[in-house]
Image: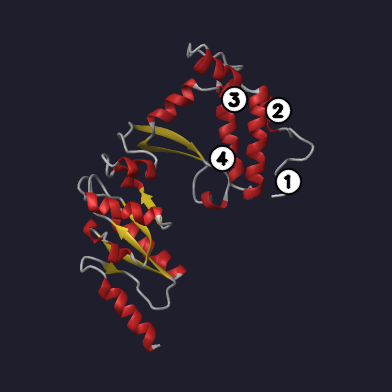
Amino acid sequence: MKTKIVLLLFLLLSFNENIDCLNCSSQNYFSILVITETNGWVHDSIDAGMTLIKNIGERNNFNVYYSDDSSVIRDNNLKDIRTIIFLNTTMDILTDKEQNIMENFIQGGKGFVGVHAAADTEYDWQWYGKLVGAYFRSHPDVMNAKILTVDHSITDHLDSEWEIEDEWYKRGKESLKRGSPTSAHLIWLQCLNSLNFSLKEVFQFELNLAIQVTRIGDFKEGIRALLIDKDNKPKWKYDAITDVPPEWIKMHTDPAWQKNPLEDL
């Protein structure tokens, strides 16, 4: 017991004074570091995010270290850290040295989680841009929308139809308007299936759908219009979402094989 207490004290004292531990215990298996430094917009949800991560740590036996000062990203501080989380960080927060330390940390096999505005961070650091996958560009328009509720246990408290005013992403809206009406139906079907499918069933369904779409769907026409002729004027089989019959959608989900190649997953 004394050994565990001494070890815990050593871990706590070895960290920079700008780091707090929200739930440290000698019984925990590993540690993570949450960074919340901002040089731009400060999200009100940071405190709620910290509470959530702390609770997850307590339930799953890992220490949650926290700092709003990225200067704590030092080799000696990260020695016992398994994952770094950027929780709603904004703009440039790391020095060149801290960037190098973080690169070595992740390339050494350790983890990174970027939450929400982590994509609004370090725009001039190309390596980080590849890590998070994309950068924040702008907020979309605020619009009213009617929401149709899917029958599921997690939506029992919602009305079958309701309206909300919120930001709706422009690119998704524009892509839906330009895209194949058949694709819109298939995407909706995928969303519905994901509520009840196992991971194995998802893989099988996705593989089968991919094959059928390339065989009978609008995929060929999309390739022609966008990549071959490049006229950007696809002639979809149906002009509008409301024109697509259920029988046509079912053809895309009919088995492409007698036995799915992923049956043995």
Q: Is residue 80 visible?
A: yes
Q: Position of residue 246 (x, y in %)?
A: 67, 27
Q: CA distance from mark 2 to mark 1?
A: 20 Å
Q: Which residue position is annotated with label 3? A: 182
Q: Is residue 98 above or below residue 18?
A: above
Q: CA distance from mark 1 to mark 3?
A: 27 Å
Q: Quadrant of the N terminus?
A: bottom left
Q: CA distance from mark 4 to mark 2?
A: 18 Å
Amino acid at dot 2: Met
Q: CA distance from mark 4 to mark 3?
A: 15 Å
- Residue drawn at the location 73% of the way across and 49% of the way down: 264
Instruction: Looking at the image, tell me whether mark 1 or mark 4 is earlier in sequence order.
Output: 4
SS for tag 2? helix
Q: Give the number of the disc on residue 191.
A: 4
- Outermost residue to the bottom: 2
Q: Mark 2 and mark 4 in contact (Cβ < 8 Å)?
A: no
| Closer mark to the observer between disc 1 and disc 4 | 1
Amino acid at dot 4: Cys
